[in-house]
Amino acid sequence: MSTMPPSQQRLAQAFVDLAASQVTEPSDPTGLLAALAAHGTELLGDCVTVVLYAPDDSVGPDVAGTGKELLHLARSAATWGEGPGSEARRTGVPVPDTALDGERARRDWPRYAARAVELGYGRAAALPLHVGDDTLGALVLLGPGGTPLPPELLTLGQSLTDAAGWNLERDRRLRETRALADQLGQALTSRIVIEQAKGTLAARHSITVDEAFRILRSHARSHRRRITEVAQEVVERRLDLQTD
């Protein structure tokens, strides 16, 4: 197996691409997965790489790579719960270089190993895709022949996978921050509308703001409506609440 290290320029470009790849949807980071698979195949010697991404056990995983047969094998392996990718995703630890015609592969991944050997691969490994504290997928490496995959190759593969994971974690945190900001904004808007409605009722009926709030709340409960909706109609003079 060729172990000539990639140039510093190629490495730098790969990490820049993985950091810059956009995640349009948290459950479908297609561009990022494709970039990871492409750079893995380009930089990791004679290996081909496939990315398995399964953030939700209730739906099928996303896979990225090249070649219809290889992608079909990756999807089948996920369905079977077999193969190095499924194992790394499940355990959160790397699956070391493994001979596909060896005892371990035949015992733990019988269908996967047999099919991979048919496709011409002799070695396999997988590196977990960590997103924060979660393991949501793996980078699978498949090498030809019987020569073991070099440790430095697996180290580089894990670094590429970690870079993709950091991108996913950054995107997840950004989405959480935006969602929290939206919730706080909605809460503030609701509070302002309720305060306006209290003032409107208090002025209209010459009552205290506490009494005005009691009227708003009582009407909302009795009509099974959100108090913010009732308050908005009061402010817009589409609802005239009466005192007892």
Image (cartoon, rainbow, N blue to C red):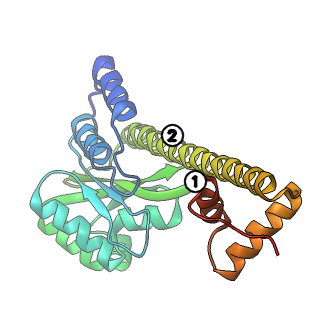
> On the image, numbered disc 2 is attached to which residue?
170
Q: Is residue 50 above or below residue 224?
A: above
Q: Quadrant of the C terminus?
A: bottom right
* 115 or 205, nearer to the observer: 205
Q: Which residue corresponds to the image point at 56% horizontal and 61% vertical from the top-left? A: 238
**Residue for badge 1:** 236
- Residue placed at 35% from the left, 22% from the top? 12
* Residue 167 or residue 142, whichever sits in front: 167
Residue 194 falls left or right of residue 213: left
Name, please, the residue furthest toward the top. Answer: 9
User: What residue sits 28% from the left and 23% below the top?
Assistant: 10
The kind of residue on which mark 1 rests is Glu
Residue count near mark 1 (Cα–Cα under 10 Å), binned few <14, some 14–19, many ≥20: few
Residue 230 in percent (x, y) is at 63, 65
Count neighbours of disc 2 (C-alpha within 10 A) and say few if under 14, some if 14 to 19, many if 20 or more: some
The answer to whether residue 96 is seen in the rendering is no
The image position of residue 43, as x and y in percent, is: 27, 34
Q: Gap in Å between the C-alphas at discs 2 and 1?
A: 42 Å
